[in-house]
Image (cartoon, rainbow, N blue to C red):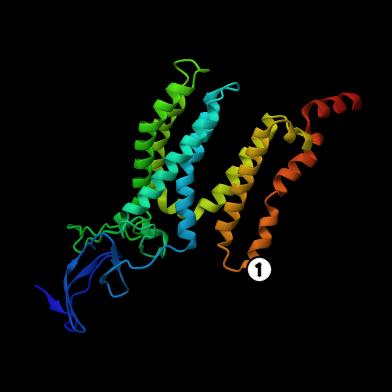
Amino acid sequence: MFRAAVDIQPACLGLYCGRTVLSVNGSVETYGDCGVCPRGQRTDDNKICRECLGSPDRYDWLYLGFMAMLPLVLHWFFIEWYSGKKSSSAVLQHLTALLECGVAAVVTLLLSDPVGSLHIRSCPVKKLSDWYTMLYNPSPDYITTVHCTHEAVYPLYTIVFIYYAFCLVLMMLLRPLLVKKIACGLGRSDRFKSIYAALYFFPILTVLQAVGGGLLYYAFPYIILVLSLFTLAVYMSASEVEFFKDLLVRKKRLVVLFSHWLLHAYGIISISKLDKLEQDLPLLALVPAPALFYLMTAKYTEPSRILSEGGNGH
């Protein structure tokens, strides 16, 4: 059944099928039959399942940071949306959401291999198909399918699900008690709406990761830039911010502005990967550019001014 490495073996079909190493005797390895690699391993160029001993590179960590930010940003959005203008509980809810996501991230890293360390071992991402190994199960005789589905991008795919699960559990343990005690300015039906919203967006995020994890891995820097630019323009327009002094009227506006600047910087860093610091760091000077452009041109695009000038022209 088993053959040594020096023997001639039948070809192992399939892009992600491999042979597990059963034993090592000096320089000779004994392999099993062609099939699925165990968790934490992926095939090498010789179709042998090798343990993932590498560490995530900078781009991998940036991707994980993006996936970790998604529930936090959504928490903050819905807390602000449902807290009301006069509610003093919003700040505490924001801090609680940050605490929940932060603790969930640390616990997830500690439980990942190697257990008890904030460092994780991983397999390198080589191409988009690495995220969708279930689509590449071979059928040698066009009848029987050899199932070789495994996590070739270990652990970038499953670690996100674990993180979301801990976020949800911590939210259900902490947030209801906090909201019940401090959200006195809200109605009984409104005070828990931000929690109800999370019960909707967590399944959506889970499906998004399950179906589009590979696409998000390659597209997230551009998604950050586009969405942050769009939401900043919408917020400043809805808040009727036209001049620099309008930003200083309320501290909340400055917080929102600086938050978007951080997202801009995160997107730029993710695209450039900071491989060449002397070339990439100057790009961060572009972070305030969209807000400055908006403030300099907003007065020329005021609808009332355009209508009045149009009327005068007639």
- Of residues 144 and 247, the one drawn nearer to the viewer in this rendering: 247
Is 197 left, or right, of 301 in this rendering? left
In this picture, is 293 found above or below 311? below
- Mark 1: which amino acid? Glu
Q: Is residue 196 visible?
A: no
Is 93 left, or right, of 125 in this rendering? right
Res 268 quadrant in image: bottom right
Name the element at disc 1. helix
Is 236 left, or right, of 35 in this rendering? right
- Of residues 12 and 149, the one drawn nearer to the viewer in this rendering: 149
In this picture, is 211 found above or below 95? below
| Residue at figure coordinates x 31%, y 72% from the top left | 44
| Residue at figure coordinates x 33%, y 51% from the top left | 158
* Residue that numbered label 1 is attached to: 278
- Of residues 165 and 205, the one drawn nearer to the viewer in this rendering: 165
Using a 10 Å C-alpha cutoff, classify the residue at mark 1 as few (fewer than 14 neighbours), some (14 to 19) or many (20 or more). few
Q: Tell me the quadrant of the picture where the C terminus can be found.
A: top right
Res 310 quadrant in image: top right
